[in-house]
Image (cartoon, grey):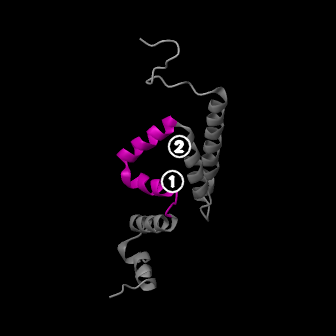
Amino acid sequence: MVTAGERNPKIMPRPSLARRARRFALQVVGWGLILVGLPLAVLPGHLGAPLMVVGLIVVLRASRQARRRFIGLQRRHPKVVFPIRRLLRRQPEILPVLWQQLLRSERFFLPRRWRRARALRRWLFPRRR
């Protein structure tokens, strides 16, 4: 039996109103960054991609439901979500992710005889023997 002075460890205390308001504000800011980044991502220069990544980071840190959905997407489509996860780390691997996405998009869009990224890498960084 639990007396008045004891707490049940399974019941989490409800967050304060200020904390809930802060989480809601962070979610609004994150979704705003994502929405601003969407049209900018299709323009030359791809300025929207970094905005969308920052917005995704903010939303995932502020929302448990968004984190659950992101994990579900990760389980269903690991090849698509893995580059995003690499960018969400504390010390993101930006250049390797960009290079991998360039190779993927080149393989997807171009016929084999037009692909030049792999040859460019081998020319820039020859293998040491």
Left or right: 115 as drawn, with respect to 34: left
The amino acid on which the numbered mark 1 sits, given as a three-letter code, is Leu
Local SS, label 2: helix
Left or right: 45 as drawn, with respect to 89: right
Q: Position of residue 112 (x, y in %)?
A: 36, 73
Residue in the image at 65% along x and 49% along y: 36
Left or right: 43 as drawn, with respect to 82: right
Q: Report which residue position mark 1 lands on.
A: 88
Which residue sits furthest bottom? 129
Local SS, label 1: helix
- Residue 58's tag is none
Quadrant position of the N terminus in the picture: top left
- Residue 60's tag is 2
Quadrant position of the C terminus in the picture: bottom left
Residue 69 lies in the magenta-colored region: yes
The residues colored magenta run: 64-93
The quadrant in which residue 63 appears is top right
